[in-house]
Image (spheres, rainbow, N blue to C red):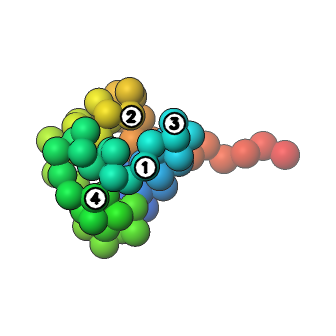
Amino acid sequence: MAARIRTIFAENLKRLRLKRGISQEKLALDAGVERAYVGLIERQKSSPTIDMVAKIARVLGVEPAKLLEAPRAKRG
Protein backbone atom coordinates (compact mmCIF):
# COMPACT_ATOMS: atom_id res chain seq x y z
CA MET A 1 0.00 0.00 0.00
CA ALA A 2 2.82 2.45 0.85
CA ALA A 3 4.43 1.91 -2.54
CA ARG A 4 1.09 2.48 -4.27
CA ILE A 5 0.42 5.80 -2.53
CA ARG A 6 3.98 6.90 -3.34
CA THR A 7 3.33 6.14 -7.01
CA ILE A 8 0.00 7.98 -6.98
CA PHE A 9 1.54 11.02 -5.31
CA ALA A 10 4.52 11.10 -7.68
CA GLU A 11 2.35 10.82 -10.78
CA ASN A 12 -0.11 13.46 -9.59
CA LEU A 13 2.70 15.81 -8.61
CA LYS A 14 4.40 15.58 -11.98
CA ARG A 15 1.13 15.80 -13.95
CA LEU A 16 -0.10 18.88 -12.07
CA ARG A 17 3.33 20.53 -12.11
CA LEU A 18 3.65 20.13 -15.88
CA LYS A 19 0.03 21.15 -16.47
CA ARG A 20 0.73 24.41 -14.65
CA GLY A 21 4.05 24.94 -16.45
CA ILE A 22 6.04 24.90 -13.20
CA SER A 23 9.61 23.62 -13.29
CA GLN A 24 11.01 21.39 -10.58
CA GLU A 25 13.29 24.27 -9.63
CA LYS A 26 10.39 26.75 -9.24
CA LEU A 27 8.31 24.27 -7.27
CA ALA A 28 11.25 23.57 -4.98
CA LEU A 29 11.99 27.25 -4.46
CA ASP A 30 8.36 28.06 -3.64
CA ALA A 31 8.03 25.02 -1.34
CA GLY A 32 11.33 25.75 0.41
CA VAL A 33 13.18 22.56 -0.56
CA GLU A 34 16.04 21.55 -2.84
CA ARG A 35 15.23 20.89 -6.50
CA ALA A 36 16.82 17.46 -6.21
CA TYR A 37 14.27 16.55 -3.54
CA VAL A 38 11.40 17.26 -5.93
CA GLY A 39 13.08 14.98 -8.48
CA LEU A 40 13.45 12.24 -5.88
CA ILE A 41 9.76 12.47 -5.03
CA GLU A 42 8.73 12.36 -8.69
CA ARG A 43 10.95 9.31 -9.25
CA GLN A 44 9.51 7.65 -6.14
CA LYS A 45 12.90 7.53 -4.45
CA SER A 46 11.71 9.62 -1.50
CA SER A 47 8.42 10.04 0.34
CA PRO A 48 7.34 13.50 1.45
CA THR A 49 6.14 14.25 4.97
CA ILE A 50 2.54 15.32 5.40
CA ASP A 51 3.78 18.88 5.93
CA MET A 52 5.62 18.72 2.61
CA VAL A 53 2.49 17.40 0.89
CA ALA A 54 0.69 20.51 2.16
CA LYS A 55 3.47 22.85 0.96
CA ILE A 56 3.57 21.26 -2.49
CA ALA A 57 -0.22 21.40 -2.75
CA ARG A 58 -0.16 25.11 -1.85
CA VAL A 59 2.39 25.82 -4.58
CA LEU A 60 0.31 23.86 -7.11
CA GLY A 61 -2.93 25.53 -6.00
CA VAL A 62 -4.74 22.34 -5.03
CA GLU A 63 -5.99 20.71 -1.86
CA PRO A 64 -3.47 18.22 -0.44
CA ALA A 65 -5.96 15.37 -0.92
CA LYS A 66 -5.88 16.00 -4.69
CA LEU A 67 -2.25 14.84 -4.74
CA LEU A 68 -3.23 11.56 -3.10
CA GLU A 69 -6.24 10.70 -5.27
CA ALA A 70 -5.91 7.56 -7.35
CA PRO A 71 -6.73 8.06 -11.03
CA ARG A 72 -10.18 7.00 -12.03
CA ALA A 73 -10.53 4.11 -14.41
CA LYS A 74 -11.38 5.26 -17.93
CA ARG A 75 -14.59 3.91 -19.34
CA GLY A 76 -14.44 2.85 -22.89
Proximity of marks 2 and 3: CB atoms separated by less than 8 Å: yes
Residue type, numbered disc 1: Ser
> Three-letter amino acid code at disc 3?
Arg
Looking at the image, which residue sits at the far right? 76
Q: Where is residue 75 in the image (x, y as percent from the top left)?
A: 78, 43
Residue 36: tell me if it is visible. yes
Residue shown at 25%/39% (left/top)? 30
What distance separates the C-alpha of mark 3 from that of mark 1?
9 Å
Q: Residue 54 in the image: state x and y as whole percent.
A: 23, 36
Say which label, 2 or 3, has the lower sequence index: 3
Which label lies toward us, 3 or 1? 1
Q: Residue 60 carries which label?
A: 2
- Residue found at the far bottom of this picture: 45
Give the residue type at disc 2. Leu
**Going from the N terminus, do you reach mark 4 or mark 3 first?**
3
Residue 35: assigned label: 4
Where disc 2 sits, the SS reads helix
- Whole-angstrom CA distance, mark 4 to mark 3, is 17 Å
Quadrant position of residue 41: bottom left
Q: How crowded is mark 4: few (under 14 residues within 10 Å), some or many (20 or more)?
A: some
> Residue 47 — which label?
none
Q: Nearer the viewer, residue 54 or 65?
A: 54
User: Depth-wise, is mark 1 or mark 2 nearer the camera?
Assistant: 1
Element assignment for label 1: loop
Q: Name the residue under label 3.
A: 20
Disc 2 to disc 4, C-alpha distance:
15 Å
The reply to whether the C-beta atoms of the residues labelled 3 and 1 are less than 8 Å apart is no
Whether residue 46 sits left or right of residue 73 in the image: it is: left
The answer for how far apart the CA atoms under marks 1 and 2 are is 11 Å
